[in-house]
Each structure stands twice: as C-alpha cells, then as structure tokens.
Image (cartoon, coloured by chain):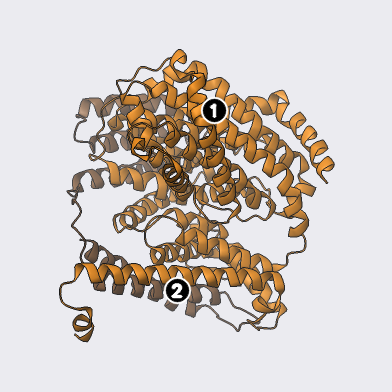
Chain colours: A orange, B brown
Amino acid sequence: MIWQSLTDLYYGFGVALAPHNLMWSFVGVLIGNLIGVLPGMGAITTIAMLLPLTYTMAPVPAILMLAGIFYGSQYGGAIGAILLNLPSHPPHAVTCLDGYPMTRQGKGGTALGITMVASFFAASFGIIVMIFASPLLVSVAFELGPVEIFSIMLLGLLMGSTMGRGSPIKGIAMTAFGLLLGVVGTDVSSGVARFTLGFHDLTDKLELVAVAMGLFGVADFLRSVNRLHFVGTEAKVRFRDMRPSRAELKQAFMPTVRGTLIGTLFGAMPGTGPTITTFIAYAFERRISKTPERFGKGALEGVASPEASSHSKTQVDFIPTMTLGIPGDAVMALLLGAMLIQGIQPGPMLITEHADLFWGLIASFWVGNVLLVVLNVPMIGIWVKMLQVPYRYLYPSAMFFIVIGVFSTNGSLFEVGLVLAFGIVGAILMALDFPIATILLGYVLGPLVEENFRRSLMMSRGDLSIFLTQPISATIIGICALFILAQLFFAARGFLRQRRLLLTPPPVAVLDD
Amino acid sequence: MKLQKDLWGGSLMVGLGVVVTAQGASYTTGTLSAMGPGYFPVVLGAILAFCGVSIAIKGWLAAPEAAEKKLPAEWRAWLLMCGSIVAFIVLARYLGLAPATFGLVFLSALADRDNNWRQAALLALAMVVIAAVVFWWAFGINLPLFRWGVS
C-alpha cells in the first residue's frame, strides 16, 4: 500500500509540475498572498472572492489554484498579524500576541522568517501524513454506508459547533441554521420547492458564493466601517532581516515540532477549528516553557508553534474532506463547495475516479508551499507596502470585487441581492455573539446529512436504533454522547462557580422567585 | 449588555425555529421510514427553537457580566453600504456595468467618515476602469458596459 502511495505520488508530481498547472498554482499563491495580506481579508473571504475566477478553468488547474489561494492567504494573514497586530483570520489572533511585540523590538523580519520556516516544515509533515493516511481511510470509507456517514457527519457538526470560541449552544443553533440554508431549494427526492419565500430564483438552491461572501465579506465590512482604525506599520522589512540566525532557528525548532504534532492531532479530529488549535498550541508552549514570563513580550516560540500547528492542521484537514467528503471547518467547506461546482464529488470514489486530481492536489500542496517560500523572499517589501493601504479605500474596492464575483457566478442580479441579505444577517448574528463560521459548515453538509439520514431510516424501516446497532456508528454516536455530557458538565460547573462568586444573595433564594 | 444580547439572540432563534417548523410542517412530513420533504426542516426548526430557549434562559439567569464597551451605531454608514449594493442591482439592470460599478463604489466609500466625495469619486472611477478592462474586456462578463433600459 505504501509503495502504491509513492508511485501515485510520483504521478501526482507529474500532474502538479506540468507547466500549465504549475502556472495556475503560482498565480493562486500570488493572488492569495496579495489579497490575504490586505487588512481585514481572511482566508474565507479571499477564497470566496477569487472563486469565480476558476469557473472557466478545467477542474485540475482550478482546484490547484484554489489550494494556492488558500495557502497564500493563510501566509498573508500571518504577515498582517505580525507587522500590524491585525488578525484578519481568527487563527492568527494568537500570532499577534508575540509576533507584534517582536515587530516593535525591530525583529519583525525574524518573526516572518521563522513563520515561513515553521509553516513549511509543518505543511510538509502534514502532507506526508496525508499521503499515507488517505489511502487507508479510503479503504475504510468504502465500507461505510449511509448510517455510518450520517454518524460521522453528526460528530463533525457537533464538534464543529461546540469547539469554537464562545457559547456551545449558540454554535449548535448556527449549525442548525446552516443546515436549514442547505435545505432551501428543490428537494431531490420529492421535487417540492422548500423555503423559497416565493422567489423563483431560489428553486435551485442558495448559491454558495453568495452565502459565503455575504456572511464573511459584507457582514464584516458592515461591522468594521468607521471602527477599524489602524496606523500603518513603521516596520521596514527587507529580505536580509528575514533570515533567522542559527540560534533563533534552534530556539524555534522544538516549538515548531510540537506545534506540528498538535496541529496533526487536531486535524484528525473532525470539526475542531483552526482557531482553537492555534490557541492550544500557544497555551501548551507557554505551559512547558521554563520562562513563561517572556510570552506576550516577543517570544519566538509563541510565533513558531501556533503557526506550525495551523499549517499542519490544514493539511490533515484535507484528508476527511477529500476521502469522506466531510469538511472539518468553514474553509474546507468552501473548498468542498468549489469542487462540487467543478463537478467533482469528494469521497472515497475520488481517489479511484479522479486519481490525477487527488494525487496532483497532494503534490501541488507541496509545490505550493515551496512557491510560497520562493515568492515571499523577494516580495516581502511589496507585501509590507500593501499593508499600508487604508481601510477606507480597501473595503469599497472589496465590495466591488465581491459583487462582481457573485454576479459572474451565474450572471444573476438576484444573487447580488442575496449577498446583501446575508451580509445583514451575518452582521446581526455577529453583533449578538453568534459564531458564523459554523453556518457555512452546516450549509455545505445540509443536503448530505438529510440524504444519509433518510436513506439510513429507509433501510431500517423507520427504526432509529439502527444508529446504535451498527458497530461503527454506535461507537461514533457514543463519542458524540460523551462529548455532549462533557460539555454539559463543564457548563454546569462554570455556571455554578460563577453564581457562587458573583451573586450576593444565596442561590436558593434566587431559584425561589 | 451580555444579558440583553442573549435574550435578543435567543428570542430570534426561537422565532426563526417556530417559523421554520410551521413552514416545514406545511410540506409533507411523512414517517421515519419514508420521510417527506418536510421532515428534516421540522426537526431542524425544533432544534433551533430549543437552542433559542436555552440561550435566552441562560442569558436571563447568568450573572450580569461587566458591561463591554458599546460601539456607537453607524446608521449612516450601514444605510450607505446596503444602499450601494441596491444601487448596483438597479443600475446594472437599467444602465449597465460602468454606472453600476461607479454607484456601488462611490456610495460604499462615502460610508467611511474619512472619505470625502472627491476621494470616493476617484476610487469609484478607478474601479470602473478595472471593471471595464478586467471583467468586461478580459473575462467577457455577461453585462454590457452601458445600456438604456431593460434589454
């Protein structure tokens, strides 16, 4: 099996290095980095905005380019976090903690250099895991029926909605809302148009790009307008400053390895978002450090470990997305949606039917990471200049790219209106502290969850116990139950503790009235 | 503040859940073994409503937290930004891509207090050029640069 993987991979490199594909990979990394470095542009916004560019392309270069865009934007986000203290993508919030102090000490270049090395190392490791784990998972995946698939999705959704930041119940509510958005349109098995609100344009389904751009683009601009003021960075970073010294490399090496392993572990768990992963990597590094007081004041370890964890997690996250068709977080959900648009259905059949795409993608991940390093060395001066673009010029331009991008998807002005609607919905939900990333996860999985649920119960003639009598499914449902119990336990404990601390009258008296 | 937020958020979810359940029930729900198109939405609506109730109750019971800094409402900016997208839709339908782009960028740029109308107009013109060169000429977007009335 391992030998098979390696020969397949060799073939994959052939695909990824074909001049045509290589070019699109490069273009993707370049534009992704360019947009991702702009303040306020997270990975999701960047991908959604550039998605329409790939519509006219063949599937293989299109997906290679999207993966490139993803990497580029991820790395671009780190630049903004380190030099400007501006986390445009939540996972980078942790990178700000030590990256920005380093910039103020004049070591911003070193921080960027270490980030690059750590990301490259972590991504390479994640890719190796992917090469060997994917075929294994695929061989298992063929055994999975609708019952098991439904249970896995349930686990993924549950973890996705509760492991993020903020309240778990709100996460579940948003997942349900996302699943509902996935239901909108014509029901496949009965032909009934559901929740179209009388709009003829909704009989097909809600357009992924419109939903994503509304929730992550327009909503964000509505929240930030007149509120996001930042001063340009004074930092001048040149190529020479980026090269870390031998001592710095040594200092960052073990944190990078630990971050990579944490990211790999969390990537293997469905539904755990990248933000929580980077936070855990940072907290872990700080706990085991002999000098925890340095953290928050420019500790190199505090940059290397979280950045490494987010990159290895990203790679490992691709495994369930590609082999089972179950995305781990909102970014994966968006990439999955992009593949569906290209007529590629991720799942166990993907490796057998689209071997060129699958192995080409894996090889291009690595090629993309190499390109990222190559590109960032000479371009860093330009990225730093990009950071100076004031937000008041940036968001109107971004609004234009969003609107034109959505319009070009189907040539429909109705969908432009949808962007506005979802922008308002997203802004309201964000103002009420609801986590909106899980909406996208629910939206992409919605139709799949419904179909597998239906088919499972058709098989069992309406007997719900089928989810508990099949061994694989029963195990997964068991994990779900344990997970919910643990959440309830922590919630109850926190709640009681808080009341004991804060309420002056004894709790009994409050319960009485 | 937090308390009110959760009350609002919870009520919103309850309302949404109830509407969805009612609407879902109007499609055939069917039975577990042969689910109709309404089954899944009804279940989801119920989950939403249940979550909403929990959020609201939790927000109501929880000890009031330290009030966070309340950001002032930006009604002018919000209206301008929403209006800019509406303007794009209307202008694209009747006048074409170039006026629509101008309207969109001009109005949304005015939403920022630090932009004056001249800067907004210049930015809008720059975007019109990009729209014309990149999207209309290179990508061949399905929208004429200028038109008069619905064609």
Secondary element at image label 2: helix
- Residue type highlighted by circle 1: Val
Question: Residue A40 at x, y = what percent?
Answer: 36, 37
Residue beneath the point at 37% across and 62% down: A167
Number of marks present in the image shown = 2
CA gap between label 2 and label 1 equals 45 Å
Dividing the picture into quarters, in which one does residue B107 lie? top left
Question: Residue B44 at x, y = what percent?
Answer: 48, 72
Say which mark, if any, is on residue B47. 2
Q: In the displayed structure, does residue A61 sit left or right of residue A115?
A: right
Q: Give the answer, above or below, for where A154 lies relative to B81.
A: below
Question: Residue A511 at x, y = what percent?
Answer: 23, 83
Image quarter in which the C terminus of chain A is found: bottom left
- Of the pair A101 and A419, the residue shown nearer to us: A101
Q: Nearer the viewer, mark 2 or mark 1?
A: 1
Say which mark, if any, is on residue A33. none
Say which residue label 1 marks: A117
Q: Chain of mark 1?
A: A
Q: In the displayed structure, does residue A334 sit left or right of residue A297?
A: right
- Residue type highlighted by circle 2: Ile
Q: Residue furthest front?
A: A290
Q: Chain of mark 2?
A: B
